[in-house]
Amino acid sequence: MVIFFKRMLSHGSRKTNKERISLYKEEKRCFRRVELNAPVRYEIRGRADFGNTLTDNISEGGVAINSPVFIAPATPLKMEINILNRVLHPLGKVCWCQPLPHSSSNRLGVEFLEFEPLERGFLKDFVNMKLV
């Protein structure tokens, strides 16, 4: 939420009759995230090669992972995420990819596009359990 705050200072102040506007950053995420180091196997759709890594954080709408290679935004990914000995199979797309400082790895943000309803429900319950 963006909040505008407008205040006129009194005549005794050094900054008389000037407006001050404070903007607070808006949270754009639709789903709350929890930190989680769970094993992930991912492959770029249409290619035979795959990668193994760990999640950094996860929500009902997406996941952040580390990757040894750069994967361009908008790249579709097939994923297998192991949470509490249950393997989830979402399809997603890379939203952003940033190099990690002092490393050859990259951090990826992946948005879930397709998810089996039961698997999404399991993930939602898991995240809510972690938030309590």
Image (spheres, helix red, strand yellow):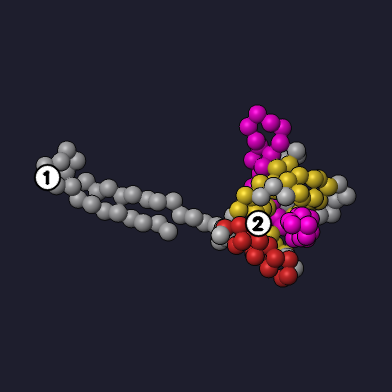
Q: Quadrant of residue 33?
A: bottom right
Label annotation for residue 116: none
Please say if the residues under marks 2 and 1 sit with CB atoms less than 8 Å apart: no
From the top left corner, tell me how far across and down residue 12 is, in percent: 11, 42
In terms of sequence position, does the residue under pointer 2 or pointer 1 come before the other?
1
From the top left corner, tell me how far across and down residue 115 is, in percent: 73, 65
Name the residue located 78 percent from the left edge and 57 percent from the top edge: 85
The N terminus, quarter of image: bottom left
Magenta residues, as a range? Answer: 78-107
Label 2 crowding class (10 Å Cα cut-off): few <14, some 14-19, many 20+? many
- Amino acid under disc 1: His
- Amino acid under disc 2: Gly
| Magenta stretch: includes residue 84 | yes
Of discs 2 and 1, which sits in the foreground? 2
In the figure, 107 relative to 129: above or below?
Answer: above
Residue underneath mark 2 = 62
Residue underneath mark 1 = 11
